[in-house]
């Protein structure tokens, strides 16, 4: 896991939402300063939803499915930086946020946030299908056509961002929800609100001849998903003092999906049929 020293506060991130992310320059081990967006979660947010750990695990899982996400690391707000690099107002704001390391996502220049009326000319059907399937898998309700798209785009490619709300059923105290999710899957049902997903209208509108099996590639990646690699990532996060939630439930869920990957593929197809 990449821990970076805070170097310069530049500005608030435009369009950053309720967490009011900071646009900063962070210093890596070689001394190079790189532009990052630092998420400023409250302690309550971190305690209840494990937002920092979820951001990291969401990005790590996305890479395992060959989905593009920005490079990420963790911003270490040193005492020296807090004293000499921040104004009094910023110090007061920082003091109201969660203690410890902060999730930092590398700035993606030239890729603005997607808005309603998303241009899809550069997005292939399989791109949309894989993102859709991934979000259904991690229960990411935060990429919608009528709300936040959480997609950075340009005329050639895209990046997925903001996964702090994913996997809500592994939050502490959410075991009844976890059991419901697993029971529904075992009964051939998905309770995720897929109709509001950003790509649902596009996938639903595809001609039948185009959607014979749009989730094939996703299922291939699910079959080869290395759970030991995800476990190691959770362990490394724990060493940094970053929790992801109930790890036992996370791996029970992912293991169940791998065992029933063919069935999960059929369920995904059923959502757009």
Image: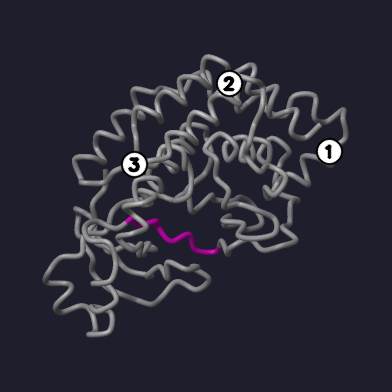
Q: CA distance from mark 2 to mark 3?
A: 26 Å
Of callouts 1 and 3, the N-terminal one: 1
**Quarter holding the N terminus?**
top left
Residue 213: horizontal and vertical position, in percent? 74, 24
In the rendered structure, the answer to whether residue 167 lies left or right of residue 155 reads left
- Dot 2: what SS? helix
Q: Nearer the viewer, mark 1 or mark 3?
A: 3
From this viewpoint, which residue is outermost toward the front? 176
Q: Nearer the viewer, mark 2 or mark 3?
A: 3
Which residue is rendered at x = 77% and y = 35% of the image?
Answer: 272
Marks 2 and 1 in Cβ contact (< 8 Å) = no
Which residue is rendered at x = 42% and y = 34% of the image?
Answer: 175
In the rendered structure, the answer to whether residue 213 lies left or right of residue 13 reads right
From this viewpoint, which residue is outermost toward the left? 80
Q: Which residues are magenta?
A: 103-110
- Count neighbours of disc 3 (C-alpha within 10 A) and say few if under 14, some if 14 to 19, many if 20 or more: many
Residue under label 2: 220
- Count neighbours of disc 2 (C-alpha within 10 A) and say few if under 14, some if 14 to 19, many if 20 or more: some
**Quarter holding the C terminus?**
top right
Does 178 lie within the magenta span? no
Residue 104: horizontal and vertical position, in percent? 35, 57
Residue under label 1: 206
| Dot label at residue 244 | 3
Q: Nearer the viewer, residue 25 or 211?
A: 211
Residue 144: horizontal and vertical position, in percent? 65, 53
Q: Nearer the viewer, residue 21 or 193?
A: 193
From this viewpoint, which residue is outermost toward the bottom? 88
Q: Which of the 4 quarters of the picture holds residue 181?
A: top right
């Amino acid at each position: 896991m990449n821990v970076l020293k805070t170097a310069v506060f530049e500005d608030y991130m435009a369009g950053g939402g309720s967490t009011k992310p900071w646009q900063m320059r962070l210093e890596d081990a070689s001394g190079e300063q790189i532009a990052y967006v630092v998420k400023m979660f409250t302690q309550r947010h971190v305690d209840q939803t494990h937002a920092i750990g979820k951001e990291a695990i969401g990005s790590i899982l996305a890479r395992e499915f060959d989905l593009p996400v920005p490079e990420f690391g963790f911003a270490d707000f040193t005492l020296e930086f807090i004293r000499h690099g921040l104004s009094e107002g910023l110090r007061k704001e920082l003091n109201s946020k969660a203690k410890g390391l902060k999730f930092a996502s590398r700035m993606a220049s030239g890729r603005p946030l997607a808005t309603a009326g998303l241009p899809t000319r550069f997005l292939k059907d399989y791109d949309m299908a894989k993102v859709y399937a991934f979000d259904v898998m991690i229960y990411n309700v935060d990429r919608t056509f009528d709300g936040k798209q959480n997609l950075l785009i340009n005329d050639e490619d895209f990046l997925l961002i903001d996964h702090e709300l994913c996997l809500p059923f592994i939050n502490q105290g959410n075991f009844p929800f976890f059991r419901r999710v697993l029971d529904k899957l075992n009964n051939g049902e998905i309770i995720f609100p897929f109709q509001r997903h950003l790509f649902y209208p596009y996938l639903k509108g595809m001609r039948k001849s185009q959607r014979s099996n749009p989730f094939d590639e996703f299922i291939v990646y699910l079959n080869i998903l290395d759970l030991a690699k995800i476990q190691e990532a959770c362990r490394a996060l724990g060493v940094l003092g970053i929790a992801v939630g109930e790890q036992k439930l996370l791996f029970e869920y992912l293991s169940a999906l791998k065992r029933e990957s063919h069935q999960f593929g059929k369920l995904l197809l059923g959502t757009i049929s």
